[in-house]
Image (cartoon, grey):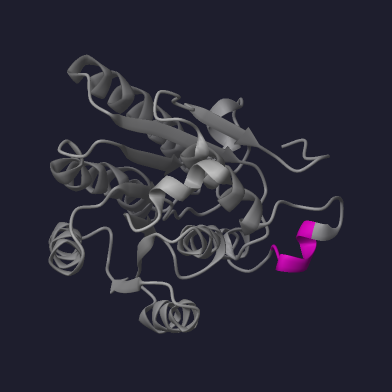
């Protein structure tokens, strides 16, 4: 996209980048010439992605980190700053969740979901803002879900609640920054069903990857990456607040 050229050479951080949507976004940002820090727990996958993108000339920094650990996140931001400088674009993509009713839910699953889906994005925003205020333009993008815009979805209640929280955090942050008159844009992307490993993990393997294609063509990680590029491509005075994107035919 033409408007993305101005981001070349600037620094992006993408969380949950060892696969799926995060990997797709990292590839897209590297493709427009950004320096991309990729964060996740799976060190081997991060290393493989960084090596692959590096062969094409991209500058990629692999950050093996537990986003639910504050010390890990602080160390990650410090390492990015030492190598490149302060982050210009933050994409909070990492997410988790287990499919279950509230009646049968597990305490540890709930805690993990709150840490990764809500507290970790808030922490990354806090740390990114420390350097963003001095920039002429910056962008924060939080990945939520179509479930944050819909009535209750059976058996996914706690995950859905966490995504409603992401929506609230995003809207509140935008209002806080508007009062300060900053040049930091805040957007959210709310996807429907995307062909990744997430649903299989969330259902303990009962929902297989191939099941996505039984009723309709699901979204692909590249579709979400295109939405990120669109947000970045708009002029600095344009703030895209939310993009709702679903595959044709998805009912829930």
**Residue 245 sits in quarter:** top right
Quadrant including the C terminus: top right
Q: Is residue 125 above or below residue 26?
A: above
* Left or right: residue 231 compared with residue 171: right
Where does the magenta region start and end?
A: 207-212
Residue 74 horizontal/vertical position (percent): 14, 58
Would residue 169 be visible to someone looking at this image? yes
Question: Is residue 102 visible from the viewing direction of this image?
Answer: no
Residue occupying image coordinates x 52% and y 68%:
19
Q: Position of residue 43 (x, y in %)?
A: 36, 80
Position above or below: 158 against 34 = above
Q: Is residue 136 magenta?
A: no
Q: Is residue 122 left or right of residue 210?
A: left
User: For the point 55% across and 49% down, which residue is it?
Assistant: 100
Along the line of sight, the residue nearer the viewer: 116 or 25: 25
Q: Say which quarter of the image contains residue 130.
A: top left
User: Which quadrant of the figure has residue 2?
Assistant: top right
**Residue furthest to the top:** 179
Please tell me whether the stretch drawn in magenta is mainly helix, strand or loop: helix
**Coordinates of residue 233 in the picture (x, y in percent):** 51, 39
Instruction: Confirm whether the magenta stretch covers residue 209.
Output: yes
Residue 186, position in %: x, y? Answer: 37, 32
Task: Name the residue: 83% across, 39% down.
Answer: 249
Q: Residue at x 27, y 18 (%)?
A: 178
């Amino acid at each position: 996209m033409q408007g993305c050229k101005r981001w070349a050479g600037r620094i992006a951080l993408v969380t949950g980048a060892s696969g799926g949507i995060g990997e797709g976004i990292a590839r897209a940002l590297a493709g427009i010439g950004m320096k991309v820090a990729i964060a996740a727990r799976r060190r081997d996958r991060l290393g493989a992605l960084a090596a692959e993108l590096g062969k094409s000339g991209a500058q990629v920094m692999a950050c093996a980190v537990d986003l639910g650990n504050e010390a890990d996140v602080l160390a990650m931001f410090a390492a990015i700053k030492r190598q490149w400088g302060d982050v210009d674009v933050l994409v909070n993509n990492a997410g988790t969740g287990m499919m279950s009713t509230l009646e049968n839910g597990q305490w540890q699953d709930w805690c993990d979901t709150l840490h990764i889906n809500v507290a970790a994005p808030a922490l990354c925003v806090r740390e990114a803002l420390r350097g963003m205020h001095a920039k002429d333009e910056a962008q924060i993008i939080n990945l939520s879900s179509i479930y944050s815009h819909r009535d209750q979805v059976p058996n996914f209640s706690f995950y859905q609640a966490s995504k409603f929280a992401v929506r609230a955090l995003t809207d509140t942050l935008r209002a806080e920054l508007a009062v300060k008159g900053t040049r930091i844009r805040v957007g959210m992307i709310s996807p429907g069903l995307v062909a990744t490993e997430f649903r299989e993990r969330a259902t303990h393997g009962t929902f297989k990857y191939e099941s996505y294609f039984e009723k309709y063509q699901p979204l692909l990680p590249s579709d979400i990456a295109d939405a990120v590029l669109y947000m970045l491509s708009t002029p600095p005075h344009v703030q895209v607040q939310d993009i709702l994107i679903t595959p044709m035919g998805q009912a829930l």
